[in-house]
Image: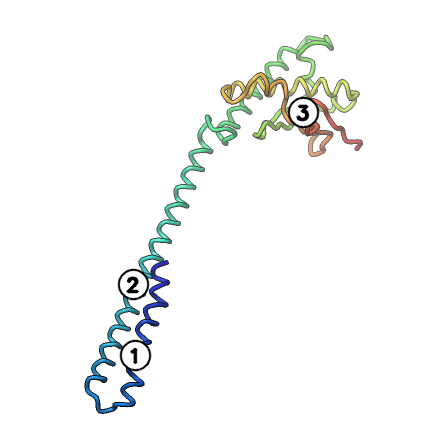
Amino acid sequence: MLGFILMFIGPLVGLIPILWLFVLSKKKENSASSKKLFKYAAIICLLLLGSSGVILGVSYEQKIAARNASIRQQKQEKKQQENDPSVLDSKAQIKKVNKGIAISLKDDQNHLNGDSNPNSPYAFSNKVKSIQYLGNKKIVVQVTSDFLSLNDEQKKAVIDSSQDCAFTGIIYGASHLTSSTDAKKGLYSTIKFGNTTLGHSDSTNFKNYEWSNA
């Protein structure tokens, strides 16, 4: 800022006496003192111009250096955050949560083998292909073709159990970032069969679902 001020004020301060002395020298062309004053004023103006340019250059370099340092710091902080499993919804944490969900779902599916009881707590698992945690308390539930023939009440039971399964993974990956209140509220769920979206949680109640008619 100082460099810009000097850049404009410096020449102005120097030009005023030069113009005045120039006019004066025209009136007194033979005056040696006027010519000398004119020369001194010109030197002062050049010095002011030079100093303003130096200050402006230094100020610009400092500004660029500060901006580059800020960008480097932001990149470093972002990289640290992405690789820190203790940071909410960092890439490392989401990866760990999804690993826990996959283990939990596979365990439920293994318990279901040979169990034909439709009321088994593991009955949902043969209608769910995968559960993916996206971060920000959101999941995507990929269902099997068996899910398509269920009525709305049965679909709700499957997705409610999928949310419980997902919470097991969240506890595995980030137990300090969840609570019983979160479990009660649930996870915002998007239900898909392949690339087709079958439904999703209501925005005000994650355990109520809106189903597509398609």
Q: Quadrant of residue 144?
A: top right
Residue shown at 62% from the left, 13% from the top:
110
Q: Quadrant of residue 54?
A: bottom left
Q: Is residue 213 above or below residue 33?
A: above
Residue shown at 28% from the left, 68% from the top:
50
Amino acid type of the residue tagged 1 in the rendering = Ile
Circles 1, 3 touching at the beta carbon (< 8 Å) = no
- The residue that disc 2 covers is 54
Q: Residues within 10 Å of mark 2 (few under 14, many from 20)?
A: some
In the rendered image, residue 107, in percent from the top left (x then y), is placed at: 59, 14
Give the number of the mark in front: 1 or 3: 1
- The residue that disc 1 covers is 18
Please indicate whether residue 91 sits to the left or right of residue 41 in the image: right
Give the number of the mark in front: 2 or 3: 2
Please indicate whether residue 73 sits to the left or right of residue 180 in the image: left
Circles 2, 3 touching at the beta carbon (< 8 Å) = no
- The residue that disc 3 covers is 206
Which structural element holds mark 3? loop
Mark 2 or mark 1: name the one nearer the start of the chain.
Answer: 1
Amino acid type of the residue tagged 2 in the rendering = Val
Q: In front: 148, or 203?
A: 203
Which structural element holds mark 2? helix
Which structural element holds mark 1? helix
Give the number of the mark in front: 2 or 1: 1
Q: Quadrant of residue 33?
A: bottom left
Disc 2 and disc 3: Cα gap in Å?
63 Å
Q: In front: 4, or 28?
A: 28
Q: In front: 198, or 111?
A: 198
Please indicate whether residue 148 sits to the left or right of residue 73 in the image: right
In the rendered image, residue 206, in percent from the top left (x then y), is placed at: 67, 24
In the rendered image, residue 205, in percent from the top left (x then y), is placed at: 69, 25
Disc 1 and disc 3: Cα gap in Å?
79 Å
